[in-house]
Image (cartoon, rainbow, N blue to C red):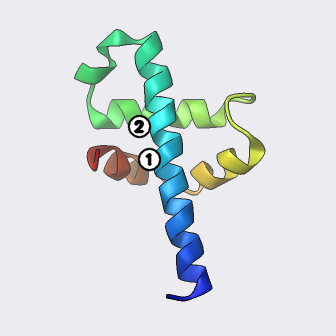
Amino acid sequence: MTLQEKRKDLDSERQKRLLTRLVEELSRSDPELYYRSTSEVAAQIEGLIGKAGRLSLEDRQLLMRLSRRDIEVLLSLH
C-alpha cells in the first residue's frame, strides 16, 4: 500500500468519525432524527459543515470534499 493510499484510508476513517459525531449532535437536538430519511439527515449535516465554529478548519475542509450523496452513502453504512 502506498503512502497516498494510506492517507486516503485515514481521511476516510476520519470523515466517518466526524459524520458520526455530527449525527450524535443532531440527534441530541432532534429526537425524531432517527425517523428521518438519509437524504434529510445528509442535508442537515451539510448545513452543520458549513456553519462556522462547529468544526475546526481542517475538519471542515475534510468534510467539504464530500457531496451530499457521499454523505448519504457513508451514513447508510452504519
Secondary element at image label 2: helix
Q: Residues within 10 Å of mark 2 (few under 14, many from 20)?
A: many
What's the residue at 44%, 34% (across, down)? 43
From the top left corner, tell me how far across and down residue 14 is, in percent.
54, 53
Amino acid type of the residue tagged 1 in the rendering: Arg
Q: Are marks 1 and 2 in contact (CB under 8 Å)?
A: yes
- Label whose residue precedes the other's in the sequence (1 or 2): 2
Q: Residue furthest bottom?
A: 2
**Which disc, if any, is residue 78?**
none
What's the residue at 60%, 81% (across, down)? 4
From the top left corner, tell me how far across and down residue 24 is, in percent.
44, 26
Amino acid type of the residue tagged 2 in the rendering: Ala
Which of the image's four quarters has the C terminus? top left
Secondary element at image label 1: helix
Q: Residues within 10 Å of mark 1 (few under 14, many from 20)?
A: some
For disc 1, the marked residue is 68
What's the residue at 36%, 50% (across, down)? 74
Q: Is residue 69 left or right of residue 55?
A: left
Distance from the alpha carbon under mark 1 to that under mark 2 = 6 Å
Q: Is residue 78 above or below residue 31?
A: below
What's the residue at 33%, 20% (across, down)? 33
**Which disc, if any, is residue 42?**
2
Q: Residue furthest left?
A: 35
Q: Is residue 55 left or right of residue 39?
A: right
From the top left corner, tell me how far across and down residue 7 is, in percent.
59, 72
Q: Is residue 26 above or below residue 59?
A: above
From the top left corner, tell me how far across and down residue 46 is, in percent.
52, 37
